[in-house]
Image (cartoon, rainbow, N blue to C red):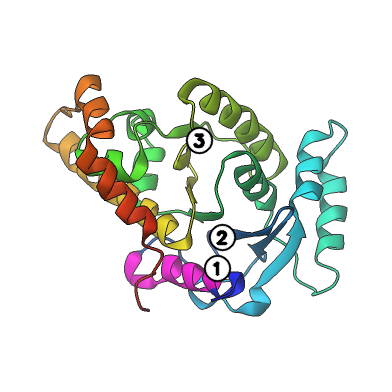
Amino acid sequence: MTDLDRIISLSRALGAPERDLVILAEGNTSIRTGPDRMLVKASGANLATAGPEDFVDVALSELIALVDVPETDDRSIAEAFSRLGAATGRRPSVEAMLHAICLHEGGASVIGHTHPVPVNALLCSEHAETLASVVIYPEQIVVLGRKALLIPYVDPGLSLARLVRDRLREHIAAQDAPPKVIYLANHGMFALGASAAEVLRITEMAVKVSRIMQAGLAIGALSPLTTHASDRIHEREDEQHRRAVLHGSEQLPAQ
C-alpha cells in the first residue's frame, strides 16, 4: 500500500458518517512521505469521499519557513498557498502549516484533524482543561498517554500554527515526549500517530473519553485516577505489551 493509499483510507475512515467525527468539508489529514515531504488534504475536499486528486504534495520546510519567518503575513500566506497548488489547481488546507509543525516537531508520521461532537462539547465549555489533563480510566493512558496538549482558541492558519509550535516545544520539554493528542479549544482535535491506524485509534479513544467525562459530569463530580495510579498503569508490563501490540497493528477497519 502506498502513502497515498494510506492517507485516503484514513481520510475516508475519519469521514465515515457513522463515526460522526466531521461533516461536509470539515477536518483534514496528512502523511509524511519523505524527509521533507508530506501529502495533505486539499482545501474544500470532503474526508468521506477523498480520492487521489484531493491531496497536495508539499515540502515541510517551505511551510515551516512561513511559520518561522516573522515577516510572514496573510498576503504572503495566500501567495505561498496559491503557488503550492499551482501544479494541480488544488490548494492545501489552511491548516497545512499546523500539520507540518506536528510532523516535524511532534514525532508523528500521520496526522488526523477532526471535530467530533463529544470532544467539541467539552472543548466549547469550561471543562476543556479537564479533557486535556484529567485521567479517568486505564485505556485512556494506553492510547492517549497521560497528558494531552490544550491550545486556547486563536484564528486557524498562521496564528494557530505559531502557537502550537511554541506550546508543543514546551510540552516536549516538560513531558520528555510529544503528545498523542492536541486539543484546540472551541475548534477540534489533532491526533498524532505513527500510522494511519494509530491516528484512528487515538481519535476514537478521545471520543470515548469525552463521552465518559460528559456522563460523569452530568451525574456529579468526576473521580479521576490518582497520579500514582496513572504512573503505575503507564509503567505496568502488561499495559506496555498491550500498547506495543496496538502500535504494531496498522490495519484500518474495512470501509
Indicate which disc, 2 or 3, sits on the residue closer to the N terminus: 2
**Which residue is the extreme one toward the left?**
219
Callout 2 amino acid:
Thr
Q: Secondary structure at mark 2?
A: strand
Q: Position of residue 98 (x, y in %)?
A: 64, 45
User: In the image, is 153 to the left or to the right of 76?
Assistant: left
Q: Which residue is mark 3?
A: 178
Q: Nearer the viewer, mark 1 or mark 2?
A: 1
| Relative depth, front residue between 56 and 23 | 56
Residue under the image location 19 percent in, 27 percent down: 225
Q: Secondary structure at mark 3?
A: loop
Q: Which residue is mark 1?
A: 7
The stretch drawn in magenta includes residue 40: no
Q: Provide the residue span drawn in magenta.
A: 6-19
Indicate which disc, 1 or 3, sits on the residue closer to the N terminus: 1
Residue under the image location 66 percent in, 70 percent down: 55
Residue under the image location 54 percent in, 54 percent down: 111
Pointer 1 and pointer 3: residues touching (CB < 8 Å)? no
- Judged by its main secondary structure, the magenta piece is helix
User: In the image, is 230 to the left or to the right of 184?
Assistant: left
User: In the image, is 58 to the left or to the right of 55?
Assistant: right
Alpha carbons under labels 1 and 3: distance apart: 22 Å
Callout 1 amino acid:
Ile
Pointer 1 and pointer 2: residues touching (CB < 8 Å)? yes
User: In the image, is 230 to the left or to the right of 54?
Assistant: left
Which circle marks residue 29 in the picture?
2
Alpha carbons under labels 1 and 2: distance apart: 7 Å
Vertical side of 211 occupied by 48: above or below:
below
Vertical side of 214 occupied by 204: above or below:
below
Indicate which disc, 1 or 2, sits on the residue closer to the N terminus: 1
- Asked if one can make out residue 72 in the rendered structure from this viewpoint, the answer is yes
| Relative depth, front residue between 205 and 154 | 205
